[in-house]
């Protein structure tokens, strides 16, 4: 609660300064969406719900080009799950979604509060998904943020430096399976540099994790607390088609024989828009995950490939994502039909997957996409 109270005080202080300024700006917008889905498993599963996400923005620009702005939004939803005719339960949630204040100039910005931090070039299989849970199947691209302080500086040659300091985040983020200690700071940075026909970047993050609540006490040998370091490398080039790669190496030091010391994630991708009709966009990624007790051992691994296709026609668009699990020789198929009319957007999702879902297990709601089914969604933006 301390981090929320501190951010509220920052927000209210900035709001009072902005509201008395003649050149201040105030924006209120948001979205309302309703959805319903069915999974044709045995027994059949149903899901239905409604979401309201309002957002307030305040801003002010001073004469010396110093700008102050903020965003304050909530994610509120009511969700029901059924197995056959049995109600499995419901979720009624109202929580802060974005809650940050920012000071910025042409080359520098400093943002504090509950915010989204993400980077990298991969789109469907992202090794650098360190701080978010963005799901490529979600057209709304909703994800919880993290509490912290983020600073970015942009050099004249388009290079940029990121530094972050996070505190008060106790839920797992990205690919994490063990949560961070809420009271211990997490810190890191990223340096992105332009190269011929593209850019490359090096990233680092350090956190302190806690096995308590994840493993049974008998499975923990020694202290449940351990340090974890992540090193990331990524690059992207435009050479006709776009090509990119991402690599993430995680080193943890838990006192447990049940957790690996090294985790490696790698993605190689390519995309291109073909001059067919209104333009057919295609992207493909190859992803490999491995974990072992020694850095150069293959250990346990999973390998996936993905193909993304999107084609617009008028106010409509059809898209699909297909995954292939090379270990289990299985396919994952998602088709998305979209129709846009003024403030309304309508979606129809079709999926045909294995009963045992082996991808995006770290993202809530993935079990609903196991097997075969469909989902309808209507979104109103204001």
Image (cartoon, helix red, strand yellow):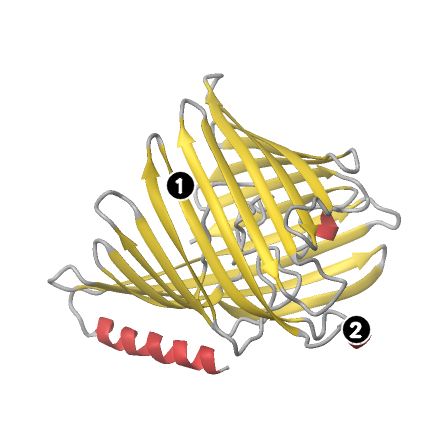
Q: Classify 79 as above or below 283.
A: below
Disc 1 from disc 2: Cα separation: 42 Å
Mark 1 secondary-structure assignment? strand
Quadrant of residue 24 within the rendered picture? bottom left
- Residue 216 circle label: 2
x and y percent of residue 175 in the render?
61, 55
Q: Classify 217 as above or below 132.
A: below
Q: Classify 288 as above or below 255.
A: above
Foreground: 344 or 248? Answer: 248
Residue receiving disc 1: 200
Foreground: 279 or 44? Answer: 279
Is there a contact, CB below 8 Å, between mark 1 and mark 2? no
Foreground: 55 or 300? Answer: 300
Circle 1 packing at 10 Å, graded few (<14), some (14-19), many (20+), is: many
Residue at 69%, 38% in the rendered image: 303
The extreme top residue here reads 276
């Amino acid at each position: 609660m301390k981090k929320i109270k501190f951010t509220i005080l920052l927000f209210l202080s900035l709001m009072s300064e902005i509201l008395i300024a003649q050149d201040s700006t105030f924006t209120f917008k948001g979205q309302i969406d309703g959805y319903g889905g069915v999974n044709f498993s045995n027994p059949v599963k149903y899901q239905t719900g409604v979401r309201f996400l309002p957002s307030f923005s305040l801003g002010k620009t001073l004469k010396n080009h110093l700008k102050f702005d903020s965003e304050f939004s909530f994610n509120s939803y009511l969700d029901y799950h059924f197995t056959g005719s049995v109600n499995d339960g419901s979720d009624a949630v109202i929580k802060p979604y974005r809650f940050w204040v920012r000071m910025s100039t042409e080359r520098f910005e400093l943002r504090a509060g509950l915010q989204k931090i993400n980077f990298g070039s991969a789109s469907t299989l992202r090794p650098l998904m360190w701080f978010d849970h963005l799901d490529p199947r979600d057209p709304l691209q909703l994800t919880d943020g993290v509490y912290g302080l983020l600073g970015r500086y942009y050099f004249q040659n388009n290079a940029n430096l990121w530094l972050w300091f996070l505190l008060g985040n106790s839920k797992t983020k990205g690919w994490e399976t063990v949560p961070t200690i809420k009271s211990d700071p997490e810190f890191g940075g990223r340096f992105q540099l332009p190269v011929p026909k593209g850019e490359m970047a090096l990233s680092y993050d350090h956190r302190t994790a806690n096995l308590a609540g994840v493993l049974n006490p008998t499975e923990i040998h020694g202290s449940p607390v351990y340090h974890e370091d992540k090193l990331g490398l990524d690059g992207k080039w435009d050479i006709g088609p776009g090509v990119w790669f991402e690599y993430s190496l995680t080193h943890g030091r838990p006192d447990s024989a049940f957790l690996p010391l090294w985790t490696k994630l790698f993605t190689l991708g390519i995309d291109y828009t073909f001059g067919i009709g209104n333009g057919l966009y295609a992207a493909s990624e190859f992803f490999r995950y491995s974990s072992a007790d020694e850095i150069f051992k293959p250990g346990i691994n999973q390998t996936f490939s993905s193909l993304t296709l999107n084609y617009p026609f008028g106010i409509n668009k059809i898209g699909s994502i297909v995954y292939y699990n090379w270990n289990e020789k299985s396919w994952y198929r998602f088709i998305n039909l979209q129709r846009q009319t003024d403030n309304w957007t309508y979606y129809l999702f079709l999926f045909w997957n294995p009963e045992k879902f082996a991808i995006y297990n770290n993202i809530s709601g993935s079990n609903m996409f196991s097997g075969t089914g469909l989902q309808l969604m209507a979104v109103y933006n204001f």
